[in-house]
Amino acid sequence: MLTHKQIWRGLDAVAMRAGLSVSALARLAGLDATAFNPSKRYAANGTRLRWPSTESIAKVLDAVNISFEEFAVLASGHHGAGEVGRPVPLIGMAQAGSGGYFDDAGFPVGSGWDEVRFPGFDGEHAYALEISGDSMLPVFRDGDRIVVAPGEDVRRGDRVVVRTKEGEVMAKELRRITGTRIELISLNKDYQNRELERRNVDWIARIVWASQ
């Protein structure tokens, strides 16, 4: 997984490649001019890390026509030719609802997976899901690929993938999780929020990146 330092380094490198300051890069992407300023990278006390949102990075990459893979190379500090990072398993969201692809903890198993390479990404059990349909608009579009890290702690506000015991797979924002219930916010406001009994949930895993 890309670190805080690597992500900000990647944005600085994108700005440099485009011949822009980080402020000009933010404006080009339709964001506030101060969004990527060094002062925004840490909280006021200088200790708590602040991260750019997935949407803001996606807007930047779209504005300068750079792929996620190129961004990850810049962020990881590998500027030469050749592949870096490692491949991760890839399946579609519809396939993820079928049996045989995950163990009880939500880790990828079995066959039938494709592969996609995420340079600079080193999550041991990470995998990618390809979005289909419009239920996750405007955050994730049909054909986008999200990188999921099972086993990592999930917190309020995280974007997560949830699989129910009935095989339903959904990407939502985590509102609240207790010992008995999981409350989820739909990314697309045309779709209802969900409340699930934990006993009916197969697994929940955090979305750590999206290739848009």
Image (cartoon, rainbow, N blue to C red):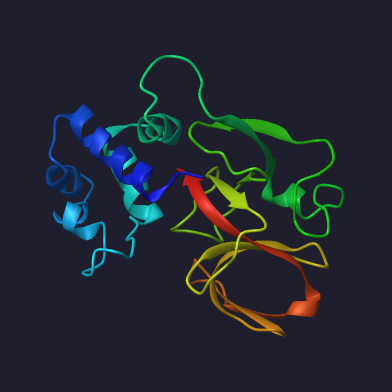
> Is 73 drawn above or below residue 22 in the view shown?
above
Where on the picture, by quarter, is residue 138?
A: bottom left
Say left or right for 95 vs 22: right
> Taking 95 as reference, is 135 left or right?
left
Q: Residue at x 26, y 61 (%)?
A: 42
Picture quadrant of residue 2: top left
Residue farthest top in this picture: 81
| Quadrant for the C terminus in the image | top left
- Please provide percent x and percent y for residue 105: 78, 59
Q: Residue 178, percent across and down? A: 65, 84
Front-most of residues 128 and 142: 128
Instruction: Report x, y in % for residue 141.
Output: 50, 50
Location of residue 23 with respect to 196 vertically, above or below: above
Residue 118, position in %: x, y? 53, 34
Could you say which is closer to the camera, residue 146 or residue 126?
126
Q: Residue at x 57, y 47 (%)?
A: 147
Q: Tell me which residue sits at (55%, 56%) in the image.
A: 207
In this rendering, position of residue 7 left or right of residue 210: left
- Residue for point 12% across, 40% down: 21
**Number of marks in the image?**
0
Q: Is residue 92 above or below residue 111?
A: below
